[in-house]
Amino acid sequence: MAGVSDSAGFSFSIGTRLDGGRHGRTGTIETPHGTVATPAFVPVGTKATVKAVLPEAMGELGAQALLANAYHLYLQPGPDIVDEAGGLAAFMNWPGPTFTDSGGFQVMSLGVGFKKVLAMETVDVQNDDVIAKGKERLATVDDEGVTFRSHLNGSKHRFTPEVSMGIQHQLGADIMFAFDELTTLMNTRGYQEKSVQRTHHWAQRCIDEHERLTADRTHRPYQALFAVVQGAQYEDLRRKASRELAEIRGAGGTEFDGYGIGGALEKHNLGTIVGWCCDELPEDKPRHMLGISEPEDMFAAIEAGADTFDCVNPSRVGRNGGIYVEAGRFNIDTLRFKRDFTPIDETCDCYTCGHYTRAYIHHLFKAKEMLASTLCTIHNERFTIRLVDRIRASIDGGYFDEFRAEALGRWKGRITAP
């Protein structure tokens, strides 16, 4: 039996490579629902929507693909509903490619109650039974899968690699991820080793189930499956995980269509860790970095070899009054903007900057109007997408290093006003 991806309608081709032995490159991902030019930022629509913004508007902002969350859609409305609607893209009236994550992130976020961030700082004390202060453990992990209680109503559920694959096949995204265990930097080295091995075994089970479901669901377009590399901040574990995942084959010979790079990591080591993984992963397969969106992180990940990446930050920050501009990130709900009748960013081509002032958006936040979230999310998503588009152009044009120096020279992180 040939691998299911032999005639799948999914492919990846490499365009321009960075020089100096770096893994960064441009490329093209072909999916049944369209093409993604890489590097690309994939906005997150957790529950089949980017909060506060119409799916059609995301296309106008330049988004090439959207990512939804398997855990949340499993709980509500249920993957059978999405399947009956014709799949995720049809359900949300989004014409382009879609991604779904496996639910593995919730193993960590529900289990230990930490905020939804990947980049952390090294802590002095390691503890495998850690839980965030004031939080309740909602998920427990064993070698077969994860048992958890719904954050909506407390009902009990069980995810295994096979269950995750079944859910994601019903959701119908063009790209889905193998079920993995996400650890924290507070876990001990011993636990990280066990977790990497557990994720490896789960990946094998995922690809076997993926083969079976693909053969059973010929009425739907092919869905690509990416394995996920874990290993925290340890070079040997990251390299080992990457090599071993690349060697996995399904019972019918199927290979993974691409690879995700996940896990908790130290922000200042992000590029280094991505580089370790890309040293070992097949060059001809796309690589997705899970959960980054700050400009310095994007430059580091792309240079080190990430082709696509996602993050909730542009929309989540925007809903809380945070605004991205070339100089940094600031809060528009502070008093200084009450009488500022200029656009958020005069250099931005988004709808918000073309039609509304800082004073008006400041007013919307103070008045607790929903439109505030919409206008800020539009701007932040466009800022992020546009920056990655410019990075891609700089690689193709041979001026990546110059553009990075220019962009990061302007970026100051948190600022009080642009």
Image: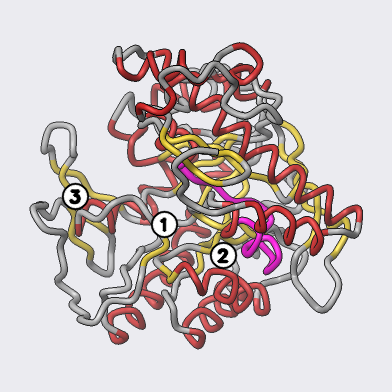
Q: Amino acid at mark 3?
A: Phe
Quarter residue 19 falls in = bottom right
In this rendering, is residue 19 above or below 42? below
Comparing 294 with 278, the one in front is: 294
Which of the colour schemes (rainbow, by chain, secondary structure, one colour) is used?
secondary structure
Instruction: Report which residue position mark 2 lands on.
Output: 251
Q: Amino acid at mark 1?
A: Phe
The image position of residue 207, as x and y in percent, is: 52, 59
Amino acid residing under circle 2? Ala
Q: Residue sitting at 50 percent across and 20 percent down?
A: 340
Which callout, 1 or 3, points at the residue further toward the start of the chain?
3
Mark 1, residues whose alpha carbon is within 10 Å: few (<14), some, or many (≥20)? Answer: many
Q: Nearer the viewer, residue 129 or 213?
A: 129
Residue 302 percent location from the top left of the image: 68, 60
User: Which segment is the magenta one?
Assistant: 298-313
| Secondary structure under the numbered disc 2 in the rendered image | loop
The Cα–Cα distance between marks 1 and 3, rounded to whole angstroms, is 15 Å
Which residue sits at x=66%, y=26%? 61
Q: Is residue 32 on the magenta stretch?
A: no
Q: Label 3's element?
A: strand
* Disc 3: CA contacts within 10 A as few (<14), some (14-19) or many (>=20): many
The residue lying at 71 percent from left, 30 percent from top is: 347
Q: Secondary structure at mark 1?
A: loop
- Compared with 44, 272 (above or below) is below
Q: Identify the mark at residue 179; answer none if there is no mark.
A: 1
